[in-house]
Amino acid sequence: MEAIAHLIAAAEATAADEKNANAAMSAGFAYGLAAIGPGIGIGYLVGKSVEAMARQPEAAGMVRTTMFLGIAFTEALALIGFVVFILLKFA
């Protein structure tokens, strides 16, 4: 009888460990997906800004300011993804 109780306790611990492992994997996957979009967006934004500065050097200051604002807003998406990662991991 004691052996059966021990097996049940071990199975419950394994289920809890499996749940934690699944939560960690899904949270990591979610953050990975959340980081792809801002990475592509920032690359595209900087590339187009450099192109605009090369075409019109006299407007470089305004383009640079707008570029940094765009980078900040795009990076906010990655931070939101990180918050979701934390929520999935520890919820």
Image (spheres, helix red, strand yellow):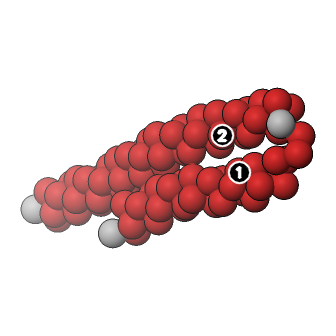
Distance from the alpha carbon under mark 1 to that under mark 2 = 7 Å
| 58 or 50: nearer the viewer | 58
Q: Is residue 39 left or right of residue 65?
A: left
Q: Position of residue 32 (x, y in %)?
A: 51, 42
Could one spot residue 89 in this view of the protein? no
For the residues labelled 1 and 2, say whether their Cβ atoms are less than 8 Å apart. Answer: yes
| 11 or 70: nearer the viewer | 70
Among the 4 quarters of the image, the one containing residue 91: bottom left
Q: Position of residue 44 (x, y in %)?
A: 64, 34
How busy is the neighbourhood of tag 1: few (under 14 within 10 Å), some, or many (20 plus)?
some
Query: In terms of sequence position, does the residue under pointer 1 or pointer 2 come before the other?
Result: 2
Q: Is residue 41 left or right of residue 90?
A: right
- Residue that protrudes farthest toward the right in the picture: 57
> Which quarter of the image is occupied by the N terminus?
bottom left
How busy is the neighbourhood of tag 2: few (under 14 within 10 Å), some, or many (20 plus)?
some
Q: Identify the residue at image location x=86%, y=32%.
A: 54
**Would you name the residue on which mark 2 appears?**
45
Amino acid type of the residue tagged 2 in the rendering:
Leu
Could one spot residue 41 in this view of the protein? yes
Q: Identify the residue at image location x=71%, y=51%.
A: 67
Indicate which disc residue 86 carries: none
In what element is the residue under mark 1?
helix
- Residue that protrudes farthest toward the left in the picture: 1
Amino acid type of the residue tagged 1 in the rendering:
Met
**Would you name the residue on which mark 1 appears?**
67
Q: Position of residue 68 (x, y in %)?
A: 72, 57
Q: Position of residue 2 (x, y in %)?
A: 17, 64
In what element is the residue under mark 2?
helix
